[in-house]
Amino acid sequence: MSDIILRAENLGFSYDDSGSILKDISFTLKKGESLGVLGPNGGGKSTLMKIIAGLLKPTSGEIYFHEKALSTMPSYPYHLFSYVPQTNELNPTMPVKVYEFLDFSISHFKIKDKNLLDELLALVGMSHKKNSLISKLSGGEKQRVLIARAMIQKPELLLLDEPTKGLDSNGQDQLLSLIETIKRRDHTAVMIVDHNINQIIKSCQNILCLNRHSHWHDHRDFLTKNILEDIYHCEFEHLLIHEKDLQNNERAPHSHDHHFCGHDHSDAQELKTKPHPFIRKKS
């Protein structure tokens, strides 16, 4: 069997006559590898994730799982992957404890392993929160519970749509460290959509730069500053400042729009002297 878990070939998507949301998107993802998807807001990142998860149907192109075309399969291979969506599914007012939430999910999949619940809690570092109410958990703890649920069936592919959204820098590091642990333990392929450029570049071997079109797809070591500037239509130093704003939870107009470059970038010179370890200048 091929090591390629997922392959997309010239994927396209549009809503009626509103124009293309995605066009000619191609990439591959192998067993035990991670693919980070970067791009500006409105660039189609979450749309692509929903297509891979089977929530949207592409209007063109083909998806392959283990090199078998999806169009030839009798049904969508949901058993191969788990999807953790961007929008938190956990109702904050529901009086459910962590172990009850996971136990219900395990029962739903008709899994009889009595030790599975405790194993999942240990995996995501939530054993001490077993009897805590979901509503009392922090954002990072809720994400850990969702990841624990996603790992119930030990998927070959884990799809994560902005898993670090709303977390501080420390919380982001911890969550991405957990994802790396899962990847190494189970040789799980991981596909991550996130706005955090630095975290994605550090945690994913391969990068897909997406702005409706597939601008670039390769190993992170070959990613250049010029490629990022091209995909975001903004200088790399500006991107770092935008990202800093997001991490500080600033809500000023345009603070989330990487197309807007009208900020006062008085500290850009300092950032220029500290290049990202994985970002190369164009030779």
Image (cartoon, helix red, strand yellow):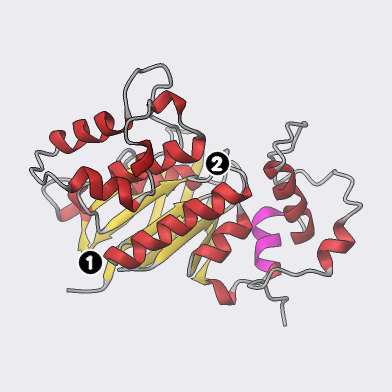
Q: Amino acid at mark 1?
A: Glu
Q: Describe residue 220's horizontal placement relative to residue 228 as left or right.
A: left
Expressed as whole percent of the image width and height from the top left, the position of residue 19 reads: 51, 39
* Picture coordinates of residue 171, whole percent (x, y): 55, 47
Name the residue located 66 percent from the left edge and 62 percent from the top edge: 228
Q: Is residue 253 above or below residue 279?
A: above
Residue found farthest to the front: 128
Out of 126 and 158, give the one closest to the viewer. Answer: 126
> Can you name the residue that lies furthest to the right here?
266
Q: Position of residue 1 (x, y in %)?
A: 17, 74
Q: Is residue 274 left or right of residue 108?
A: right
From the viewer's perspective, tell me whether residue 119 is left or right of residue 85: left
Q: What segment carries the magenta color?
A: 226-233
- Taking the spot 22% from the left edge, 74% from the top edge, the residue there is 2
Q: Is residue 42 in the magenta section? A: no
Task: Say whether residue 230 is magenta.
Answer: yes
Residue annotated with mark 2? 165
Q: Residue at x 78, y 54 (%)?
A: 238
Q: Quadrant of residue 143?
A: top left
